[in-house]
Amino acid sequence: MSELRSIAVLDLYRTRPKNWPVRISVGFMFALMGIAWLAGDFFTADTFAQSRQANVERFLHELLPFPLHNVDFDWAVAARWGWEILEDKGFEALYTTFLISVAAIVLASVVGALLTIPAARNIATDQPFGLYHGSPSVVSRLLWKIVFVVTRGVLILLRSIPEYVWAFLLLALLGPTVWSIVLALALHNAGILGKLSAEVTEDLPPAPLRALHALGASRAHVSVMAVLPVAFPRFLLFFFYRWETCVREATVLGMLGIASLGFWIQEARTRNFYDEMIFLVLLGVILIIVGDVFSSLARRWLRRLS
Amino acid sequence: MRDDRLNIGRRRWILAAVLAAGFASIYALDLQWSQLLPNAGGIHTAGQFFARALSPALNYESAVPQHTTPLLIKALAAAWQTILFAAAALSLALVGGAVLGFFASTALWLPAGAHEPSSGRPLGAALLGVVHTLIRLLITLMRSVHELLWAVLFLAAFGLSQMGAVIALALPCAGILAKIFAELVDEAPSEAAYALRAAGASRLQVFCFALLPCAMPDILAYVLYRFECLLRTSAVLGFFGFPTLGLYIAAAFENLHYGELWSYLYTLLILIVIADWWSGLLRRELLR
């Protein structure tokens, strides 16, 4: 009996569904991780050398707020020290970081929304929404194909270049204005939002779009009057998801020299004020957690409206 | 994602609020539209920069000593280093994410089935609850500090150490993976879990043989997406002096070698596009 059962189990095991692309990819990924540790130069001999250890000890010692060095710990002194940093630069940096993220995500979603229409397969074609438009003309099919491929190409280009690289390039072109950071974030996120919303648009139930189009609505009409209402909740989800990332990145992009949080973190580091640096990093953590909470509250509020 | 219903009637107010927030931010940041036009120097730089977009350099733009590695090989080597940093970080993040995610999921300390009497050991349950909360806090802290900030912290503590860079990449990634692991395991269909539990399996067995296999396709798809993100950040780490693509991008820009800059940018672009295509393909394959 038990033998029979084990044969049945073995049979089940042997005939379980196998997906070769997935298996090959997983194997490849594991191989890559193994090779990384063998081929990478991560274990330099001096990782744990004496000088490094001394450096780490000094670093840990200097994480303590400066007025508290060599005296007993006193919360009042620590609080006064923290408040001074906050008044001096902290509040302003937080405010600027927040504003940069909002400006960037709104610009990104406007650009992304505009690019969605020529990037969606069901709109950017000579036979939109699966409706018969008479015998297809070669020229118009070719033109739509070009529009589609170019838009998708632009979206790939926009989202493939990391924000940091965009900001680095824009800073050189525009000079040190906040625009370079806002635009860097906006360009990268426009690429992501455009791709995501084009995919949502392609997956929409086709009937309402087709019906409107059959009644004579143009592609633009259908986009505004049918695609936007039906896909709006999904678009909003993406908007908040990318906004969270924008808050994160806006903190860091300051390291390129614009007065957001990252700028002061970098500045504290170059002056070796590690206590101040860690304080500002923790401020960033608070900003990000507040952003996350706000975004999830907003999403819940939007859902409850129904 | 599960509940998409939304009051459509309020959509215009939401749109208006979003646009108003955008304009208010632009106003408060004191951004002028005129600043968008680069100044004379900027236009000159931009002209030189974009002139090379279609003719990236195939050789070094300035004289180099003999026997220097050819430019394209160097670009490929930088791309390879970028991949190595990302893969090493992913291996650490996978281990960390799996361990933390296991403790952050509720599968271990909530009754697996509706008919299960609550555990007879309240002390043990309370202890597990405390561990759970602490782990969740740790995860939030890990992923709330950006990779590059971790890198800066490690740079300050250890100096330029490649291991530090890998750990900086791995920490936030492990935090995110742990969060996603826990959520996916908690949301996995529970029928199999109930069945195993009723047949007498322990909670650990239920976790390993019912919940985990159900959540596996989603987890795999997400891990690959994270690898793509790691590649991007790994490239950016070069700006801090590690031998990934960012280092060469920054160097080429500072030397005004715009042709070389485009070669490196295109290498990065191709790398990311391949990763993007691969993870997209697998996601479709897994979530079918």
Image (cartoon, coloured by chain):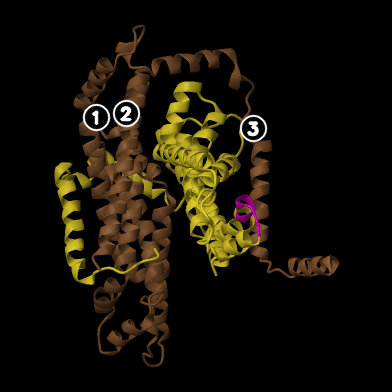
Chain colours: A brown, B yellow
Q: Which residue is mark 2?
A: A280
Asked whether the beta carbons under mark 1 and mark 2 sit within 8 Å of each other, the answer is yes
Image location of residue B112, percent across then percent down: 54, 57
Q: Is residue A36 visible?
A: yes
- Which residue corresponds to the image point at 51% horizontal and 25% vertical from the top-left? B160
| Location of residue B136 (image quadrant) | top left
- Mark 1 and mark 3: Cα distance apart in space: 51 Å
- Which residue corresponds to the image point at 39% horizontal and 15% vertical from the top-left? A62
Chain of the residue displaying label 1: A
- Which residue corresponds to the image point at 35% horizontal and 54% vertical from the top-left? A241
Q: Are marks 1 and 3 on the same chain?
A: no
**Which mark, by number, is residue B67?**
3
- Which residue corresponds to the image point at 59% horizontal and 29% vertical from the top-left? B65
User: Where B221 falls versus B179 (above or below)?
Assistant: below
Dot 2: element: helix
Q: Is residue A204 left or right of residue B72?
A: left
- Dot 1 amino acid type: Gly
- Dot 3 amino acid type: His
Image location of residue A289, percent across then percent down: 33, 42
Chain of the residue displaying label 3: B
Q: Residues within 10 Å of mark 2 (few under 14, many from 20)?
A: many
As for residue B204 lying within the magenta part, the answer is: yes
Q: Which residue is mark 1?
A: A90
Dot 1: element: helix
User: Where B91 falls versus B271 (above or below)?
Assistant: above
For marks 1 and 2 on the same chain, the one whose residue lies earlier in the sequence:
1
Of A16 and B12, nearer the camera is A16
The residue stretch that appears in magenta: B200-206
Q: Is residue A257 visible?
A: no
- Mark 2 and mark 3: Cα distance apart in space: 47 Å
